[in-house]
Structure formats: C-alpha cells, structure tokens
Amino acid sequence: MFSRLFASPKGRIISAIVFFGLAMLAGGVVGFLDGYASASGQPTFLESDNVIWIVGLGAVVLAVASFAYGAFWMKSIDEAAQEAHKWSWYWGGSVGLSLGMVAFVLSLAPVTAQWTIPTLNGRTDPVAYAATGAFGLMLLLTAGYGIAWAWWWFSRR
C-alpha cells in the first residue's frame, strides 16, 4: 500500500501533508487540553507527573513514523538519487560529526576560564547540556549532509 503511495510525486506530497497534519493536530489537541486545564484550575500538561512518559511515547512514535516514512521514500526514488543521499550522509555527516568531535575535545581541556554554554531553554543541569549537545550535533550532521548533497548534484551537472 505504502509503496504505491510513494510511487508518484503527488502521493509523496499528500503523504507529507498527512504526516505533518497529524503532528499539528496532536499539538493542537495538547494545547487545547492544556489551556482547558489551566482555565479550570487543574494542573496543566507540563505540571503533570506523567509528562515525561507522554512526551517520551510521542517521541518514540514520531521516530518510528519518521523512519518508516524515510524507508518507503528511499525505496521510491531512483538509483542515482539514492546514491546521492547515501554519499551525502556518509561524507557530509562524517564532516559534521568531526566538527562535533572538536567541540567534545575542547570540553575535555583543563578549565582555565569559566565557560558559559547556552542551553536550549536556559537550564544548567546535565540533562540540558546533553540535550543541547545532541541537538547541536544533529545540526552539524544535517548541515554537512546538505552541503554534500548540493555538492554531489552540482558536480554532476
């Protein structure tokens, strides 16, 4: 069923719209319920004890759906495009990862001055620093991939 959906550009666009539409719907439902709880004096979503489990479950579902979408999409493109993406992830991701390793090695240097590393939400606990590092590494990998992908296609034109 999914292979036929990804066989045409129109099917890919429709599936992407459905995927992002469901994500927006889920965000809207959570926002509505959070607003309702706040207005009625009940604990909001972020104040509940189960927030970590709900967000974790949502992240797992999103990761599985993204992986499935990517796998079906990769099978639907031609061999040249597949090779471009594989080459770009290998070389671009490797360069991005090596830049992340520079930051990691610098973090092991002896402390000679007080470093202040901005985190994603201003927190200063170890989890916030780990999440900021993971997010930064994902950005480096993705930027490396994008540059390598453009290089691949422009060098073959």
Image (cartoon, rainbow, N blue to C red):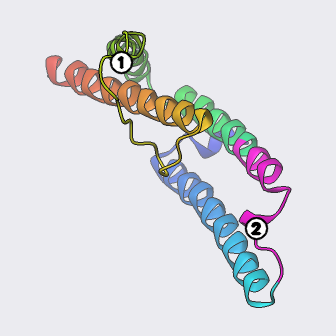
**In this view, 114 is above or below 106:** below
Q: Which badge, 2 or 1, comes first in the chain's sequence?
A: 2
Tell me if residue 136 is in the magenta stretch.
no
Q: Residue at x 36, y 27 (%)?
A: 140
Residue 104 relative to residue 66: left or right: left
Asked whether 139 or 64 is in front, the reply is: 139
Residue located beneath label 1 in the image = 103
Q: Residue at x 79, y 46 (%)?
A: 57
Crowd class of label 1 (few under 14; some 14 to 19; many from 20; radius 10 Å): few
Residue located beneath label 2 in the image = 45
Q: Residue at x 83, y 81 (%)?
A: 42
Asked whether 121 or 141 is in front, the reply is: 121
Q: Residue at x 23, y 27 (%)?
A: 150
Residue 73 position in % (x across, y down): 55, 34
Screen quadrant of the C terminus: top left
Asked whether 84 or 135 is in front, the reply is: 135
Q: Quadrant of residue 93?
A: top left
Residue 118 position in % (x across, y down): 39, 42
Gap in Å between the C-alphas at discs 2 and 1?
Answer: 35 Å
**In this view, 49 is above or below 2:** below
All told, the count of numbered labels is: 2
Magenta stretch: dominant secondary structure: helix
Residue 40 position in % (x across, y down): 80, 90
Q: As shown in the figure, which amino acid type bears the numbered disc 2?
A: Phe
Q: As shown in the figure, which amino acid type bears the numbered disc 1?
A: Ala
Residue 82 position in % (x across, y down): 44, 20
Screen quadrant of the N terminus: top right
The range drawn in magenta is 42-59
**In this view, 49 is above or below 77:** below
Q: Secondary structure at mark 1?
A: helix
